[in-house]
Image: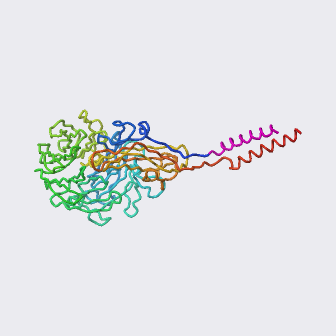
Amino acid sequence: MKRIISKAITLLLVGIIVSSMAYPAVAALSRTYTLDADFDEGTLVGVEHTSVADQLQLSKTPSALPFIWIPNSNEGTVSKVNTETGQELGRYRTGPQDKAQGSPSRTTVDLSGNVWFGNRATGTVVKIGLYEAGQCEDRNSDGVIQTSQDINGDGDITNQYGTEILAWPSYASFSNDECVLKEVFLGVSAGTYENNEWGIGPRGIAIDSSNNVWAGSNGQQKYYYINGVTGAIIKTINTPNNKPYGAVVDKLGILWSSGQDSNTVARIDPSTDAVSYIYPGHFVYGIGLDTDNHLFVSGWESSKLSRINVLSASKDWTKIGKYQSRGVAVTPDNDVWVATSPSNIVTRYDHDGVEKAVINVGNYPTGVSVDNAGKVWAVNLNDGYIKRINPATDTIDLSKLIKGITGSGIAQHYGYSDMTGYISRSITTKIGTWTVDYDSGAAGTTWGKVSWNGYTPPGTSITVKVRSSPDGTTWGGWETASSGVSLSSTSAGQYLQVQTTLQIVSGDVSPILYDLTVASSDGTTAIPEFPTIALPILSVIGLMALMYNRRREE
């Protein structure tokens, strides 16, 4: 009898083991990121863990995303170029093909990497989403973003075969290119396109720390304040002594506007809508901000360069510059770079206006911008080229020809605003992101919570958003997470992408991310290979077999 009981117990244990192997209980999956090595699994832009280890804080060095948006004024398109490789990744139409070319010129990049640009001729402002950051809209719900992109991987966008540049979406459906997000009409009803470069068309455009847009109409002498999400016009501010020609927003939220032949720089305080003026004593063309509360102003045919203290709203100095100087940019060392069209040069000045270098960049440069590596890009009107200057050597280290829309001819670049987002992300506000992909290893993972610990002094924020994917390639929409609160709209999927944003809106103290944990929902259950009754069946069968054998032995 003891032998029977012993064997029964043995078989019962075997049944338990086999049963548990047949349909395992799956615990909630989770991963915590807290060490330097953990953070390095993701992509860091504008954040770092070197000054203090095992935590993320904003970088001291200004930064931008690795893209530059180039206006192609003669063909009514805007090109997106990778600033590390020089490859053209996308080219977008700026208005309907059956209308006059929009003549896009001024561009500004928002805090998420999307571009806003003004069409001088048609009087519109257009927003294009950054495809690489998941900023586009799957409007037809097919799981794929239809947009302009480099289909054949040759680093050039052309419409030779009608596949790499999509048609402008009709205003009614707005569905052809799913990265074309907003079209804002200034001062006229929607769908009404002007055909006048000196009319309503915006010539000054800038992003503020709330990710909203200021667009200045040269002809109307007025700024429109546009909601960066909805595209709705929030308010307008008149600038009667200033013809908007360029715009930047400083770290205090003050909007500065170059005034062209009005010879003024307008200071606009959005908190009160008060407008005041500074008179540099010359034509006011391109403008650029440094990190030390200074605004630099080029003088076009006045051959002048001026510096304005934005804290005191007064001019520091005016010095002799180059004839017909246009676009202005300032690198992280606070050196000033100015494009001069007829001389085919970019001139480098120190912070006090002393000339340091002159670089020949090709035929008729109009604008300059600083990229995420601190290099300077010049865009040319007459030869189709964009050139990258290395400040370490004052030489060109990359040249890229933007071909015409049909694959022949050239695109003409008329732009001299913040084409990379360097000003908006590093001076207007300080912002950085850490983006990481977590692979749960299990298909169809149901996601539960994202939790984090951080430090947010006054005037700062930490925000986290997530999206899921079944394959790590096709992603769903973003959901903004609350720490420790169950996700509500993120679909099941094997992969979860997490983007954490640190931002300083006011002050100089960085927020800090100490750790972040992602977890699937509790009680995630795997589909068993055998019915759940396997355990009692195995045990009963084993016991019956023993009793049967025992009777035979007797």
Residue 412 in view of the camera: no
The range drawn in magenta is 1-24
Q: In the rendered image, is residue 18 in sight? A: yes
Residue 162 is situated, as x and y percent measured from the top left of the image, at 40, 51
For image coordinates 31% across by 42% down, the residue present is: 63
Percent position of residue 350, x then y: 18, 38
Q: Nearer the viewer, residue 447 or 423?
A: 447
Residue occupying the far front of the picture: 2
**Residue furthest toward the right?**
554
Where residue 255 sits, quadrant-wise, is: bottom left
Describe residue 161's horizontal placement relative to residue 411 as left or right.
right
Principal SS element in the magenta part?
Answer: helix
**Along the line of sight, the residue nearer the viewer: 503 or 540:** 540
Q: Quadrant of the N terminus?
A: top right
Name the residue rendered at 15%, 40% in the picture: 352
Q: Residue furthest top?
A: 393
User: Residue 40: x, y in percent?
Assistant: 41, 38
Query: Compared to 550, does 256 lie above or below?
Result: below
Residue at 73% x, 42% y: name it: 12
Q: Which quadrant of the rendered structure holds the C terminus? A: top right
Q: Position of residue 406 (x, y in %)?
A: 35, 49
Q: Is residue 90 above or below residue 224?
A: above
Residue in the foreground of this view, choosing between 154 and 83? 83
How many discs mark residues in the rendered view?
A: 0
In reply to whether residue 2 is colored magenta, the answer given is yes
Residue nearer the viewer, 128 or 195:
128
Q: Is residue 546 magenta?
A: no
Q: Residue at 74% x, 45% y: name it.
A: 538
Residue farthest toward the left in the current orientation of the protein: 281
**How was this image coloured?**
rainbow
Seen in the picture, residue 273 relative to 339 is either above or below; the reply is: below
